[in-house]
Amino acid sequence: MEISGTAQHEAWQARALPPVEQLRGDLWSIPVPIPHNPLRYNSIYAFALDGGGLGLIDTGWGSDDAWAALTAGLTAIGGDVTDIRGALVTHLHFDHLGLAGRVREASGAWIAMHPADATAVRSLTTSGAQHAVDTEVEFLVGLGADRDEAVSDVGAAENFGAWTSMAVPDRMLEDGEHADFPGWRLRAVHTPGHTPGHLCFAEEATGLFFSGDHVLPRISPNISTNARGGDPLRDYLDSLAAVRDLDPTEVLPAHEWRFRGLADRVDSLTAHHEHRLAELLAAIAAHPGSTPWQLAAHLTWSRPWEQYERRMRIFAVTETDAHLRLLASRGLVVGSGGPVPTWTPAAR
């Protein structure tokens, strides 16, 4: 894999925000900060459109500081937020969709997403923060959490206000459809896993591949279960295989830095998850009859398990559950059933 976003990589090593970059005559990368997050920033991609105006891929975290960074970046490339005609949002997370409503209000731009994530956003905005909290607490209890720990980790409903007021998109993009960006041939590539409706965008004229959070150069995106069910890790691995051989000229992710060598990176991400599955299978053999909450404590993480709490612990446990579901679908483990399933190796 070759690092092509050298300025981004150097900024990352210096723990600084990278510069606004002109990637070609009609394409720019604008870094927008994410508060209190190890990912540090989103790369928002701005396009000059035939006939005038700008298009965006993603919008950034929904905060005043992020808005200031986005608008300053647009000014730096000779534009303004009022020039935006449309925004493609790769997926529903707040660091990608958070500013979409403000962009639409300031410019009249349309907002496009995959229907699966649009449905989830609409549900969040209609059911409210307390419902979101209660649903997540019950889901974690069903994974083996003590109720008091689950309530503490999820937090109070007032912390979810921004999440339940995100912009509901007004345009849907299905797999294979092209975005309405005059002068560009951006084809939506449905890549479920990180979220059910995650989209990448393949630019057919230039060979550029905008990978969102699906393929990042340094880390694996969080692949977690939630109350909606499904088998997200199987979806993710299938989605990786689907993009592996696209052979783009360059990969433009939402975080970290641009790179070349998509197939190599897909192979390393696939190997990472297979290693993780093997580690989890060994933990189940050593601790049969354990819940996902208990099993997460027996896996290798970036820091000691005792330091995990709140959202970090939720991500770790739900990611463990995603790996458990894939092991079960492969016939390697068996769940006990009941309100809090426990897991044992399948009989050979």
Image (tube, helix red, strand yellow):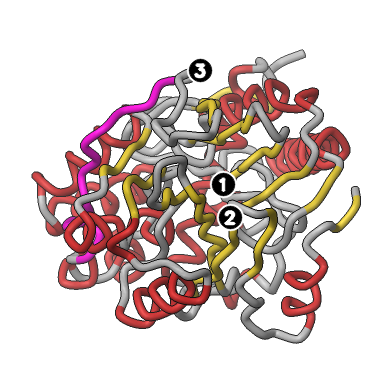
Residues at badges 1 and 2 in contact (C-beta under 8 Å)? yes
Which residue is under mark 1? 212
Which residue is under mark 2? 254
Residue at 75% x, 43% y is 276
In the rendering, at what x and y percent does residue 258 appear?
A: 74, 55
Residue at 84% x, 34% y is 267
**Does the segment drawn in magenta span residue 170?**
yes
Q: Is residue 178 left or right of residue 303?
A: left
Q: Say whether disc 3 or disc 2 marks the residue closer to the N-terminus.
A: 3
- Closer to the camera, 138 or 272? 272
Checking the image for residue 176, the label placed there is: 3
Helix, strand or loop status at disc 3: loop
Residues at badges 3 and 2 in contact (C-beta under 8 Å)? no
Give the residue type that dot 2 points to.
Answer: Ala
Q: Is residue 305 left or right of residue 137?
A: right
Q: What's the magenta region?
A: 162-174
Mark nearest the camera among 3 and 2 is: 3
Mark 1 vs mark 3, CA separation in Å: 16 Å
Give the residue type that dot 1 points to.
Answer: Gly
